Amino acid sequence: MKMALKKESMKWTSLLFVFFAISTSFAQLLQHVEPANWWVGMEHHQVQVLLHGPQISKYKVEVSGLTILEQVRTENPNYIFVTLETQNKVAGTYPIRLLDKKKVVATHEFKLEQRSANSKYRQSFTSSDVIYLLMPDRFRNANRGLDSLSEVAEKTNVNNPGGRHGGDLYGVMDQLPYIKELGATTIWMTPFLEDNEPVYSYHGYAQSDLYKVDPRYGNNAYFKAMVQEAHRQNLKVIKDEVPNHWSSKHWMIQDLPTATWIHQFDAFTRSSYRTTTQFDPYASKADVNASADGWFDTTMPDMNQKNPLLLTYLIQNTIWWIEWAELDGLRVDTYSYNDKEAIALWTKAITNEYPNLNIVGEVWMHDQAQMAYWQKDSPIGALQGYNSHLPSVMDFTLHDAMLQAWKENEQNWDQGVVRFYENFANDYLYANPNNMLVFLENHDTQRFNESYPDLATYKMALSLIATTRGIPQIYYGTEIGMRGSKAVGDADIRRDLFGNRDRLVLDANQEAYYQFTKSILNWRKGQKVIHEGKFLQFVPQNNVYVYFRYLEPVTALGKEAEVLMVIINNSSKEETLTWSRFAEGLHGFEKGLDVLTNQSFDFEQASGKIPAKTSYIIKLSH
């Protein structure tokens, strides 16, 4: 009996060994399948599945239950691109097999998942939101066990300003209540996917795996759990997309599917960064190529989106993350550096899949017409027959004004708060100025509080972006007066916020910044007049800028009338305003109350005095 049991045990051990050996062989042969799954009922129902493994192109592909529309084998024998038709299929498993004649040598259990009920028409971020921008590595280190993982090239070193500091997704989840209490409604994290460059990888913009969360932040499942928890707390989550460039350490860059997957040169060629060549009617082809095809940096190969295999890969990767994690929107890095025709196709494919999804592009230019060119349905772009399909752009010209206006205490013809007036006067160039991102700073710019280290200026600036047209975005740490000099280096404008701490310990000055930010952002949440109202501005005089937000129709006697008057005195001295000058905006209202200080105003008086370096947000009443 014992001998029989021993033989049976040896038999099962042998079978398990054989099974393990076959499984290991399969795993070694088929190293990557991307995307690994899809969903039923998608607009993008013809799915290009990338198969990668050593010399796999010699094998036949078979898929149970799905029609193979196309197979593409490139000059690299390690790839097969298989396009599958998923339309009118049900959720389930559809095995993809590689066969050597009739022998199965590798299998992937390709799954079609069921979509959530409101997936297609998910709501996104709008002008009713306030976006909180954070860098995961610099926000909160809650899981110390992720600091020095063996599988990543760069370990945590808080003593290295440009190194990894240990922030993670666990820290972001821990501090969701902090973000909500502050008054923000939407979170934009800089890229959280794997960036396995050996140094200076914390920013995440050199992604080495587009389907994998960086293990120093957590994993895919934890990211999804974080998004779900954010939704439970009525917070939205935006993903930072980087279609223009990847990491030099990306496994696909190490083993290019085709020579045209990236732009290649005889020697390293950096982008000229002259993105005006994208629409310059007189630009030479050499200059256009120098901007669009050059590498963003030595570790960031420039992706050739003219390659249809790559473009489809990028489209599907973005859709996959939106669907899988139930994301609420996108921010696109270096939007104008992409091939402009290809990025328009990419954007259109995303918005076809999700008609309500908002996407904001980084178009870092210093002229409104040039920025307006990149917004969806732009009349400027239409002059050249171009439509990017990009719903939103970042208002960098307003940011330019923010850097200069506050230090100009005396108003000249084009200085001081006139800069803001002139910026908004050019809104006729935009297809949708109310869907633009307005901000004081971000992770690439000088810290606002470094340029203007006083609370009074911060109050004026935050009052402006909280009440003007568009979608306000604040950068982590701004709310406590955090400083940092771009001249010192990027690390100085990306300082740690929480570090290893569960909560912030603020001094009196930091607390004052925090309380003001919290008050104005939470007040803004319920203000339809800000989210949707019309905008009326008056030419500044004596460095005082006055504008109104109002909902139509406005009648002085109407119970539903909503009118706000914003006054910003950037002068170095007290200024007197004659109220009759603003009769058009006052709409017959005689009184007003500042929404943050409860200071009252009587517009039946001839004039009123506005202290130096002061802003008011006044709700009008009878």
Image (cartoon, grey):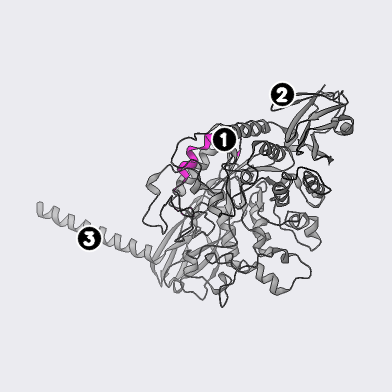
615, 561: nearer the viewer: 615
Q: Nearer the viewer, residue 160 or 556?
A: 160
Question: Residue 336, located in which quarter of the rendered image?
Answer: bottom right
Callout 3 environment at 10 Å: few (<14), some (14 to 19), or many (20+)?
A: few
Query: In front: mark 1 or mark 3?
Result: 1
Residue for badge 1: 510
- What SS does tag 2 mark? loop
Q: Nearer the viewer, mark 3 or mark 2?
A: 2
Query: Which amino acid type is shown beneath numbered disc 2?
Result: Asn
Q: CA distance from mark 1 to mark 3?
A: 67 Å
Q: Residue at x 56, y 54 (%)?
A: 488
Please say whether residue 125 is visible from this viewpoint: no
What is the span of residues highlighted in magenta in the rendered image? 159-185
On residue 14, the disc is: 3
Disc with the residue nearer the chain's start (1 vs 3): 3
Q: Are marks 3 and 2 in contact (CB under 8 Å)?
A: no
Crowding around mark 1 (Cα neighbors within 10 Å: few <14, some 14 to 19, many 20+) is some
Q: Amino acid at mark 3?
A: Ser
Image location of residue 190, percent across then percent down: 55, 50
Residue 607, which numbered label?
none
Where's residue 576, x and y in %? 83, 31
Relative to 282, is 212 above or below? Answer: above
Q: Position of residue 556 (x, y in %)?
A: 86, 25
Question: In screen coordinates, is 207 left or right of 457?
Answer: left
Task: Read off the residue under disc 2.
Answer: 598
Residue farthest top in this picture:
622
The alpha-carbon separation of the residues under discs 1 and 2 comes to 23 Å
Give me the residue at 69% from left, 65% from top: 274
If you read the primary sequence from the N terminus, does the residue marked by circle 3 or circle 2 appear first? 3
